[in-house]
Image (spheres, helix red, strand yellow):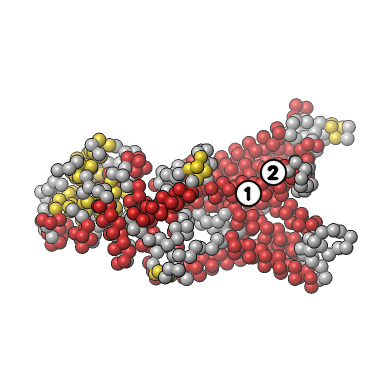
Amino acid sequence: MSKIILETRGLTKHYGGVHALEDANFILHEGEHVAVVGDNGAGKSTFVRQVTAVEQRTGGEVIFDGQPVSFSGPLEARQAGIETVFQTLALADDLDVPSNLFLGRELFKFKLGPFSWLDRKTMRDRTMEALKTTAVKIPNVDNPIRNMSGGQRQCVSIARTAAFASKLVIMDEPTAALGVQETAQVENIIRGLKDRGIPMILISHNLRQVFDLVDRIVVFRRGRIVASLRKDETDGNDIVSYITGVKGGSDAAYA
Amino acid sequence: MAEATHGLGGLKYDPAKRTRAPEWNVFAALVLIVLIFEILNRMQGGSFLFNMRDNVDGLFNQQRLDIMILQVAIVGIIALGVTQVIIIGGIDLSSGSVVGATAMVVMSFAQTATVNGNPNPKAIFGDWAMDLPVIVPIAIGLACGLFAGLVNGLLVAYTKIPPFIATLGMMVSARGAARWWSNGQPVSFPTETFGTLSNGDLLGTLTFGLLHWPGQNPAVVFVVLAILFHVIMSYTLYGKRSYAIGSNEAAARMSGINVDRHKVLVYAIAGVLAAVAAVLLTSKNLTAQAGMGVMYELDAIAMAVIGGISLAGGRGSILGTVLGAMIFSVIISGFTSIKLDAYYQEMVKGAIIVGAVVLDQWRQRKRARG
């Protein structure tokens, strides 16, 4: 088997008395696309928030790219190479597309503390490139994204992730609020990531999408990982049985 | 030309079309208002913009234009800072009071020892503070503004109280400090050099005598600062961060921007700009009073709002505020030119501020509907 890019050992998160995530053992290989599915409150988003250090874990280990890591915040995780599309869009509505893509990592003509001169042309060129590689069509990138459709905004958000993705991409329900066409566009971007060999964790409720896009499906239930199934060894009914607890029950399988 | 796409909620949006800069609408309003006053003046046999006198040269009514610019320059400088604060999603109610407090301090260090051969009757400090080089009162004044701005910024950024409350507190306290400074007495009789700060010919100095605009230094400083901050807001990281924070603070934070530190910086700059206004105001009037700058904060906010700065943050520009200041000034001058009573002027001014916001909201809703 190829190199392991992300591994969690006994990852645990308690919110006071609520055990949102319990002893999650998860492995992601290089170039692999894995879906994380489960009912509401099963611990999917909690799992992602521990990996990306949006929250600090209660216990367990995260090993990223061969190194045990303990990020102090999402920024550090990003600098290490974990790009995340959050469920709530982290976009500034009044800025144009290049500004959003480069938010927090602007390029400069010269540096002068907060008054550093922005290299707008290079950022714009790199944006056009990024949109091209991700096949996102935004007719005028100089417009503030406030006026764009939900799909276009989501595409900007995902293009940002895809453009800077170095080691791992995490998407938390990227198509939850999108229409049919827009969903198709986002799925194309995800396939593009697969072609480029960038590993991904996809959180989704949409089983059709999951079976279309990923190699392996990990099922969460009540804060535990109850199944890890290769796509070609399972089917929708099987997954649903794990999600609802018909299968898997209390004896948690390991991913 | 791409087809209009229908996004979420059936909003129609033509993605290929570049959104027109809202400054154009403000500019159009400015032209319209000038035109209205020109017509009203013509009906009375005069002219708003043009020179109607035979004994004076020039196409335009230079005197009116000079007054129009001078009367908004000082509040305009404050408005430049207030604009930046509004863009990051805050508000600064303290600028008028900071002007008052700073004015008192500045003048105390700008006094001259002898007035008509007698000791300065308004002396605040002893002989050591008399006839200091002009840089001393300027530096002390800017430091006062910086201090007030820093306090505002630190309160807003680190105690998480609403900017409205933080700066309201500063507004009351700074006014109190201004009154306490000399027990409510005015501070007067500055050195001659201090007087030339506002009343000299800065444009002549800046252009090595090529151009002259004596007595209009506040306007010159206003224009220079406006250009400076327009460039900073448009082309530097400072501007990008300001818009990002005003637009979506959580996203800015998640992108690694040090939002709190940036807020402190923006409020500090607004404080310094209020101090610049105070220096120019005291120099222009050759005196400082505790009541200086009353209502300036509201005029500055009004200029920004008329200029299309969204109070929700993230939208607007320095250019918009400059245009807003010009509209403000044209309206005041315009009412005077048609000899409208000063009481009516204030009433109408209030209505115009509300009208500008209503118009802006209406335009945005219309745009959203397509």
User: Percent from the top left, x then y, of residue B122?
Assistant: 79, 36
Q: Residue furthest bottom?
A: B43
Position of B103 with respect to B52 (left or right) is left
Q: Give the residue displayed 48% in from the left and 65% down from the top.
A: B17
Q: Nearer the viewer, residue B303 or B105?
A: B303
Q: Can residue B174 be seen at all in this image of the molecule?
A: no
> Which of marks 2 and 1 precedes in the sequence?
1
Question: Which is closer to the viewer, label 1 or label 2?
Answer: 1
Residue B147 position by quadrant: top right
User: Percent from the top left, x then y, of residue B12?
Assistant: 43, 70
Q: Which residue is mark 1?
A: B227
Position of A170 with respect to B41 (left or right) is left
Q: Can residue B79 be seen at all in this image of the molecule?
A: yes
Q: Amino acid at mark 2?
A: Ala
Circle 2: element type: helix
Query: Badge 2, how many Cα within 10 Å: few under 14, some, many 20+?
Result: many
Q: Amino acid at mark 1?
A: Ile
Q: Which residue is mark 2?
A: B278
Residue B213, compared with residue A71, is above or below; it is below
Q: Nearer the viewer, residue B246 or A100?
A: A100
Do marks 1 and 2 share a subunit?
yes
Q: Badge 2 sits on which subunit?
A: B
The tag on residue A169 is none
